[in-house]
Image (cartoon, rainbow, N blue to C red):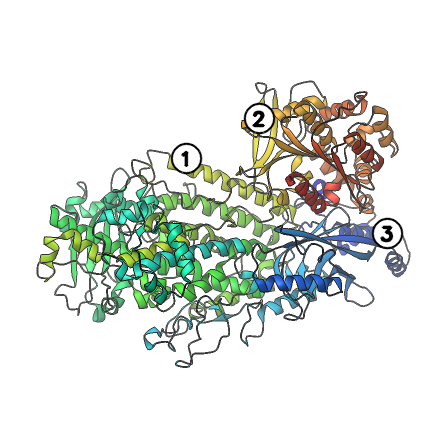
Amino acid sequence: MALAKELMGYPLITERSSLVLSASHFKKRTQTTQFSIKPFDRRPRKAKSGVVAAISEDLAKTLRFSTTTGDRKSEEEEKAAVKFKVRAVVTVRNKNKEDLKETLVKHLDAFADKIGRNIVLELISTQLDPKTRLPKKSNAAVLKDWSKKSKSKAERVHYTAEFTVDAAFGSPGAITVMNKHQKEFFLESITIEGFALGPVHFPCNSWVQSQKDHPEKRIFFTNQPYLPNETPGGLRVLREKELKNLRGDGSGVRKLSDRIYDFDVYNDLGNPDKSSELSRPKLGGQEIPYPRRCRTGRQTTVSDKEAESRVEKPLPMYVPRDEQFEESKQDTFAAGRLKAVLHHLIPSLKASIVAEDFADFGEIDSLYKEGLLLKLGFQDDIFKKFPLPKVVVDTLQESTKGLLKYDTPKILSKDKNAWLRDDEFARQAIAGINPVNIERVKTYPPVSNLDPKIYGPQHSALTDDHIIGHLDGFSVQQALEENRLYMLDYHDIFLPFLDRINALDGRKAYATRTIFFLTRLGTLKPVAIELSLPPNGPKHRSKRVLTPPVDATSNWMWQLAKAHVSSNDAGVHQLVNHWLRTHACLEPFILAAHRQLSAMHPIFKLLDPHMRYTLEINALARQSLISADGVIEGGFTAGAYGMEMSAAAYKSSWRFDMEGLPADLIRRGIAIPDASQPHGLKLLIEDYPYANDGLLLWSAIQTWVRTYVERYYPNPSLIKTDSELQNWYSESINVGHADLRDADWWPELSTVDNLVSILTTLIWLASAQHAALNFGQYPYGGYVPNRPPLMRRLIPDELDPEYASFISDPEKYYFSSMPSLAQTSKFMAVVDTLSTHSPDEEYIGERQQPSIWTGDAEIVEAFYGFAAEIGRIEKEIEKRNADPDRRNRCGAGVLPYELLVPSSEPGVTSRVFCDLRPVTVDLDDGETTVHFWISGHRRISRTNLVMLHGYGGNSKWQFVHQVSDLSKSFNLFIPDLVFFGKSYSKNPDRSIEIQARSIVGGLKKLGCVEGGGGVSVYSISYGGFVAYKMAEIWPEMVEKLVIVSSGVGFTQQQKTAELKKHGGDCSKILVPKTPMDLRLLIKISMNTGLTFVDWVPDFVLSQFIAVMYEKNRQELLELAKNLLEREEEPELPVISQKTLIVWGDKDKVFPLEHAYRLQRHLQSSRLEIIKETGHAVNIEAPTTLNNLITSFVLSV
């Protein structure tokens, strides 16, 4: 199957084949007069896409070497004399918004381009020139029509360039780009068309800076993965040069246009030059260990030479240029920042608010129902605080009608009082926004690990008497033995900081422990809360225990105790679990990956989507979230000591080997190893939504990573000798986590199992774990009483002066303990922004270009399998959320657990093939089955596009080079025609009409044409006959038609005559049975790269035939006979639809004159001719064809 795929641009070599790319291997075998092909267990060498020219030429040279005694040098010279042209299709992404300066520079660049200051490209071969021992290069080529297209408003603009290469060039491995304009541009991709067997892909996704800012040429590599020792000779120097460029030299101030990745300590959180109160300790080093962050090289402050100067908003923080947000992500954060400003504006002006504290719960509810009512005449106060023009303020006031409203958090959506109940308080410990701290109680009472000389007795104040009455008849010992006692323990993380926290204005906190009991129903209930203060504090009791209430007074105290627990929980969640574990601790691995792993390295390709945006988000956090007087300090209990608390957790409890989900569950005592269980673990809380769903995703990630790793590292020696891989891991630890580098728990990077574990952990943390900890912040924390980020008062007891006021008005005391109106409003706006999915979010199981992100077709196939598994997991989670036996995620007023659903809006679900999912439709009571690939998430605003393939194979591989682009603009419906792929029928009719009726029947069942909606149809070759019949019979359904290389209207004699020109039986050409037949079909279909076919071994061609033609061979022959022998109607009906006809000027199946004849016949048609392409236009020029289809179908 793999060679079959290669025929249309897929890799030539399969995993089970022993065919190796190196000529030396072929020489050894050919010297024995014949090939001896012997399959073996693991990967022989990575399959290669887009390098078939090199493979074929290498093979051709080898075979000639074994059969001739000619001079090799003369052969090189002979090839060098043969020149041919190839074309680059370059995709540039435009900015949606440009300021005046950018617009002016853009116009200047358009003018400069006309006079020769162009974008210049140069193609580089994987081979070395035998004379110079330097990489072979093409001529320099400029992008065409830059000036002409400079005014285009399209998001993506496609340019072309033309290279001249000789026959000995080999395969392209790299391309250089020089930007002689003044303005940077975003280069999305480059596709080279014209080499043997299809396009060569360069996924770029990078900003290319002006030559004046960065004089060196930019280097981009093909999508082909190479381990360092497998790098072709022509690419070795470039590989190291590009890495050197990314590392920099560790000096200088970074410019925003730089692409340099380097390490530094966290010494930029404070602002001592502004105020001594804003000074913050350096994080990172022996005194306060911490991970490293991205170096910016800014000057030190005047007041503290160890502190780096601040960059205040709105000025941007440095991250490497390609790490900066794309526009849609920028818009998401900008909208969030605007919302934060607007909501912070009003409550921060105390004169405009009746009272700083909420009066009751109804006042909080009004934030969502009515919004904040703005007083008239407050503009002067706003001008003093924010220098906004009066017209802006007037416009805001008019547009909002004096109201600023918040979205209702999900916690209030099903039962607005659920959060008050103990069962919901407990449920959120395993199914809320922070489900990763609960642990099994192994010793009761629990014991502290803090120094008793400083923090008092290590034993807890909890006793058996506190909880015995709440254990449903169990003794404490029985509850321990039956694993029914669990705990949230924030005692040791908070107690060392409480003296300083409680000295802050408006902050009061305890170090809490909460004991839960696991009921027979599988739910948790809180049975005791311990509140601790430093032993030398002003309170006469440093520890107290509260238990579930028995009267009104104890009920209010219990609610306050739960609020303090939630406040502890919110702080640890944000500063430790979210920021430290899924942001700060990952940054060193990301920096080292860019510095040490080439873009060609397979492990870099695996990690790449999981590193996206992290550096930018972390930089923004340093600027405004975790900085001195930032959002975290202002909104959470720990205040100015929050980052020191985060550092304490890093030093005392962070271990990379425990960051994976199974290890974490075992460490917390929630699970025990059990080989009989699905994931090798037995959960002691069986209905634990985070763990249940997390293990599904962990296993899927682990399986995918193992498949990937074993593909490139079939034995451990390859891991040990991979210099880039070892350098990446070593630098991540020794530099990025330098303060913990001597720990003995770091896994050794020496085995396949360890590499799989390391990579799975990193991907888990960056994807599923981050999702579980981040995207529920507003759904749960947006209602502040449910998770108050800070508390302002302690709980009074009988001896406190405040006790009397508490007794007289407990509700007022409760709200005076909660965050103020100003604090609440600001916090809600921030968590709303943090919880928002970007429109360009890349979800687990998807890639931006799923079919070409790597040139290894076996890995592409494996990735589709991974994506399919993610789709199944999504459905399983939906099923679990509807299961009434799972009380922690289903029930009256209970929120479903959706934080680990692999996709979220905006986005699509069930990623399987280029964001499509497979659907099988049964027609005529099961007589006919039609298999479709359809868009996983259809959008009403998008046009429905049906894609009909040509003869042979199936839809998936025929359209593999087109679907990724077309799926961005259309709702796609891609069927396998009947008897191709997975479609089949018992109906003996082999006519074109039955094909058309089967496709239309499937479309109707899929709801594609509901409500009178229509479709456009793109078809190629045989599919064109079917499309034309659809347009003829269902004119109300088919709105536009694209016909590519199709013999619609040909008479039987014309069709047969054209095929017989090439020799052989017509049916054998269409349904090849032997390698010779397939070679003939390829030569007829293609215009470029035909010589390789003669050198491909027969066994590979036979494999293609077996997969694509053997299953329904007889039916396919009958279809071919019907197609060839049927006479068209005396006069081909003239269809009414607008039609685009696309033809290759070198088509040998249906010559170009037929295209002109069809255009004359269809008066409402347009003809586009693609030069230097044959019948298989979709293979030889897919990008050009995609652009034609998109512009035609979407045109008004």
Q: Quadrant of residue 135?
A: bottom right
The residue where tag 3 is placed is 64
Please indicate whether residue 124 sits to the left or right of residue 776 in the image. Answer: right
Q: Amino acid at mark 3?
A: Arg
Secondary element at tag 1: helix
Residue 8 in percent (x, y) is at 72, 42
Q: Nearer the viewer, mark 2 or mark 3?
A: 2
* Numbered tag placed on residue 1004 in the rendering: 2
Q: Residues within 10 Å of mark 3 (few under 14, many from 20)?
A: some
Q: Camera-side residue: 414 or 290?
A: 414
Q: Quadrant of residue 209?
A: bottom right
Residue 430 in percent (x, y) is at 32, 47
The residue where tag 1 is placed is 879
Residue 17 in percent (x, y) is at 69, 45
Q: Amino acid at mark 1?
A: Lys
Q: Residues within 10 Å of mark 2 (few under 14, many from 20)?
A: few
Q: Camera-side residue: 770 or 707?
A: 770
Q: Camera-side residue: 161 or 1176?
A: 161
Secondary element at tag 2: helix
Whichever of labels 1 and 3 marks the residue nearer the N terminus, that label is: 3
Q: Amino acid at mark 2?
A: Lys
Residue 787 in percent (x, y) is at 29, 52
